[in-house]
Amino acid sequence: MTVAQPSTPASHFHLLRRQAFTRPRRPLVVFTPKSMLRLKSASSSVADFTSGSFQPVIDDVQGLDKASVKRLILCSGKIYWDLMAELEKRNERNIAVVRIEQLYPTPVDEIKQAYASYPNAELYWVQDEPANQGPWTYIGLFLPKYMDGQVATLVSRPASASPATGSAKRHAVEQADLITRALAL
């Protein structure tokens, strides 16, 4: 089985393409939020579709000096675009955001490689789901095992029985707080 949460249309395309050609066939579970359908920043060019392949981990694309990065954020899905929008507003140059596009089987080697390239960074996992839901319930268990005991700090909504607040205003407040906590140095 493969579980993925692509952050761009091209990534989604390459994931489906890989699935079509993989033998033996295995189930594919893809999480995609409806809010990304019209998100301009999450669009892909034609060249993104016609070249390349599915990347289970996408390193930061800001062109940062990796030695000066103080915080490495691992995330999956739409939260990446929210984090990047806020980083652009703040003009932060010491926070890197790495996307985990494939959640299972976990691309351990790629995650280790990304983390190793930021020698002075603290490791964080950011998700917009509550703490007791979303990828953290799995990622939080596996990271220390495969990352030489390195524990990521979780930034998420508080644990909750429901995945959403039911109020658009409260959701916006929670989302703003989540982004602020994720980017606070």
Image (cartoon, rainbow, N blue to C red):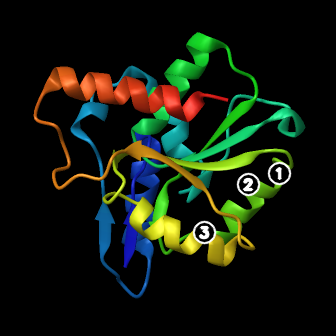
Give the spatial CA distance, label 3 vs label 2.
13 Å
Q: Position of residue 113 (x, y in %)?
A: 76, 61
Residue annotated with mark 1: 117
Q: In which quadrant of the rendered image does the C terminus lie?
A: top right
Residue 27 coordinates in the image, percent (x, y): 30, 77
Element at label 2: helix
The alpha-carbon separation of the residues under discs 1 and 2 comes to 5 Å
The spot of residue 157 in percent (x, y) is: 35, 43
Q: CA distance from mark 1 to mark 3?
A: 17 Å
Q: Nearer the viewer, mark 3 or mark 2?
A: 3
Quadrant assignment, res 38: top left
| Residue 114: assigned label | 2
Percent position (x, y) of residue 51? 58, 46
Given this view, does label 1 or label 3 mark the residue nearer the observer? 3
- Which residue corresponds to the image point at 51% horizontal and 65% vertical from the top-left? 140
Q: Secondary structure at mark 1?
A: loop
Q: Amino acid at mark 2?
A: Ala
Say which mark, if any, is on residue 150. none
- Relative placement, left or right, of 52 versus 42 is right
Whether label 1 touches label 2, CB < 8 Å: yes
Q: Residue at x 68, y 37 (%)?
A: 96
- Residue behind mark 3: 143
Q: Quadrant of the N terminus?
A: bottom left
With 60 as the anchor, is 74 left or right in this view?
left
Q: Earlier in the sequence, mark 1 or mark 3?
A: 1
Q: Secondary structure at mark 3?
A: helix
Which three-letter amino acid code belongs to the residue tagged 3? Leu
Residue 107: in sight, yes or no? Answer: no
